[in-house]
Image (cartoon, rainbow, N blue to C red):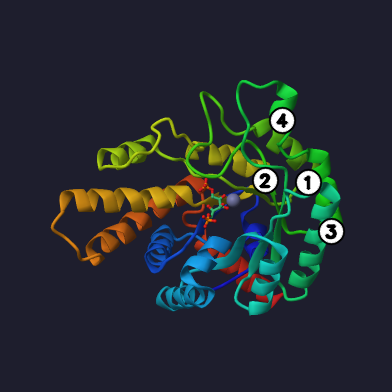
């Protein structure tokens, strides 16, 4: 069942986070649904502009609708990841997406507000949720001065102003993470002090953490042992830190890179160990299973395991009221 992200956040805020995973193909979709049914967890499917180009808008919709029929117990949102204004409108008008992200964080504050406000108006008129972004992810280095170091993190006062001016339903905040496999050097990690400051200004308002892949060392080593050439110093977010971020208002946690690492490890190891094989269904099947187990593990870290019935209950109470 497709629901909005706002409906999921109402139930989750402060208690657990909803995992938001990017998909590009059928194998990811099957592993994603299977894993969440094993974990009995609600989830968010994210579709990037790159995914829409790669698989085609219609194909992605068909894959998701088919998975929804195959797993009728599933409760999830369909969300545009890092949208520009035009793609947001396309998704809103499609009648398929239940949530969009307008990413105008590279624009000056006033322009970001104006663009986001326009998207919110059009999305809310159709009952669709909107995630916006303020601050710039990444590039936070350990060896630069404190002021500079915080230059790109989300400013808590601006965050409050931004949410009031735009009416967005959730806000992606820059709190130390970046996209991809190379997030932190040395002892860096999440800026919990900054998240707490934002929550103080926006109590009860759902915050989104992009760039939340963990980039497990073991996964990188296995990929490299099977012929890969990833930088072994690659480091991501410690998934055990999700539990600390959740009570501070982090309600949506975006994960893409880790899923790509699972895909790469399974396929590299498969073809290393079975050089005679050319039936892609064999590694495909192994990937679906590995991805499902990966989702179970992430759901445990997000505290979303077992929350499916809580969400179902809340939705049916809302429907009665
Ligand atoms: O944040 C970006 C996501 O990882 C999606 O990546 O644009 O390559 O599909 P993509
Ligand atoms: P990762 O690159 O850490 O998986 O982040 C994904 C993301 O933020 C998608 O919007
Ligand atoms: Zn992102």
What residue lies at 52% left-to-right and 61% top-to-bottom? 42
Camera-nearest residue between 196 and 209:
209
Q: Are marks 3 and 2 in contact (CB under 8 Å)?
A: no
Q: Which residue is mark 3?
A: 114
> Circle 1 sits in a helix, a strand or a loop, which is it?
loop
Check residue 249 in the rendering and tell me which mark sits there, or answer none. Answer: 2
- First in residue order: circle 1 vs circle 4: 4
Mark 3 or 2: the one toward you: 3
> Circle 4 sits in a helix, a strand or a loop, which is it?
loop
Q: Are marks 4 and 3 in contact (CB under 8 Å)?
A: no
Q: Which residue is mark 4?
A: 150
Residue 225: x, y in percent? 26, 38
* 34 on left or right of 112: left
Q: Are marks 2 and 1 in contact (CB under 8 Å)?
A: yes
Mark 2 lies within 8 Å of ligand 2 (Cβ measured): no
Q: How many angstroms separate mark 1 from mark 3 (CA)?
A: 20 Å
Dot 2 alpha-carbon crowd within 10 angstroms: few under 14, some 14 to 19, many 20 or more: many
Is 129 situated above or below 203? Answer: below
What residue lies at 42% left-to-right and 52% top-to-bottom? 259
> Circle 3 sits in a helix, a strand or a loop, which is it?
helix
Q: How many angstroms separate mark 2 from mark 1 (CA)?
A: 9 Å
Q: Which residue is mark 1?
A: 202
């Amino acid at each position: 069942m497709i629901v909005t992200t706002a409906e999921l956040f109402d139930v989750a805020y402060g208690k657990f986070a909803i995992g938001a995973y990017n998909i590009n193909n059928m194998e990811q979709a099957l592993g994603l649904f299977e894993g969440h049914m094993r974990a009995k967890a609600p989830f968010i499917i994210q579709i990037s502009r790159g995914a829409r180009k790669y698989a085609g808008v219609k194909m992605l919709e068909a894959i998701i609708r088919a998975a929804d029929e195959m797993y009728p117990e599933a409760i999830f949102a369909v969300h545009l990841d890092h949208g520009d204004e035009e793609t947001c409108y396309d998704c809103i008008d499609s009648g398929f997406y239940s949530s969009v992200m307008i990413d105008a964080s590279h624009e000056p504050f006033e322009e970001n507000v104006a663009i986001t406000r326009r998207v919110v108006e059009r999305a809310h008129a159709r009952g669709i949720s909107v995630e916006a972004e303020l601050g710039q992810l990444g590039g936070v280095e350990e060896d630069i001065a404190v002021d500079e170091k915080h230059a790109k993190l989300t400013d808590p006062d601006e965050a409050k102003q931004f949410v009031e001016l735009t009416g967005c339903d959730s806000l992606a905040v820059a709190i130390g993470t970046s996209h991809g496999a190379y997030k932190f050097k040395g002892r860096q990690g999440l800026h919990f002090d900054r998240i707490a400051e934002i929550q103080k200004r926006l109590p009860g308002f759902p915050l989104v953490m992009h760039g939340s892949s963990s980039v497990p060392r073991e996964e990188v080593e296995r990929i490299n042992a099977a012929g890969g050439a990833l930088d072994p110093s690659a480091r991501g977010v410690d998934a055990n830190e999700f539990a600390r971020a959740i009570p501070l208002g982090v309600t949506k946690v975006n994960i893409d890179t880790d899923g790509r690492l699972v895909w790469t490890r399974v396929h590299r190891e498969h073809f290393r160990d079975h050089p005679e094989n050319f039936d892609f269904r064999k590694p495909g099947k192994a990937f679906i299973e590995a991805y499902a187990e990966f989702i179970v593990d992430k759901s445990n870290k997000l505290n979303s395991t077992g929350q499916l019935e809580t969400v179902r209950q809340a939705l049916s109470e809302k429907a009665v009221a």
